[in-house]
Amino acid sequence: MIAISSRCVRGRRVALVGVLGVLGAVFVPWVASAAGSEELEVPPFVLPLEETAAAELAEEDWYRLLPTVENDGYMNRYVIESDLGRFTVEGDVRLRLRLREVRDRAFETLASRPPASP
């Protein structure tokens, strides 16, 4: 609880400033979120993979990226298909990290297989 005093500091009332600050911090975000927040949300749009920074990463022996990418206006959402499963990744940095993990897991799987007999 905030203690309200009526002391004057350089000619201004501290209590009034404190109360207005608390009311503004509590009610302004609440009113903004309640009034028309549905109208502010933009649905994601779909881009072809060729128009993204990850176009050169489209396919390798151990994975492939789906040809369409969702974008929410801030970040791309990629889908990776591999022998390990299907993964959804947000952002170019995480995509490169996840592809490295998929590649490493694919190499581990290949290394753990017994050699083929002639």
Image (cartoon, rainbow, N blue to C red):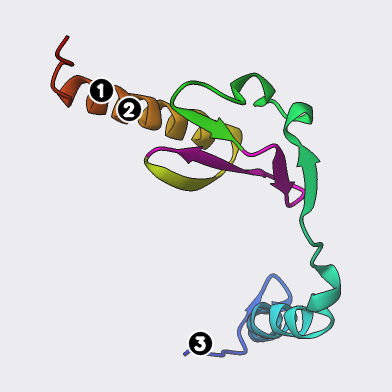
Magenta segment: does it hold 88? no
Q: Are marks 3 and 2 in contact (CB under 8 Å)?
A: no
- Residue 2, labelled with which disc? 3
Task: Give the residue type at disc 1.
Answer: Leu
Q: Are marks 2 and 1 in contact (CB under 8 Å)?
A: yes
Q: Which residues are magenta?
A: 66-83
Q: Residue at x 77, y 49 (%)?
A: 73
Closer to the camera, 85 or 46?
85
Magenta segment: does it hold 74? yes
Q: Residue at x 29, y 22 (%)?
A: 107
Q: Give the structural element (helix, strand or loop) at label 1.
A: helix
Q: How many C-alpha atoms fall within 10 Å of the one at disc 2: few (<14), some, or many (≥20)?
A: some
Residue at the disc numbered 2:
106
Percent position of residue 109, x then y: 24, 28
Q: Give the structural element (helix, strand or loop) at label 3.
A: loop
First along the sequence among labels 3 and 1? 3
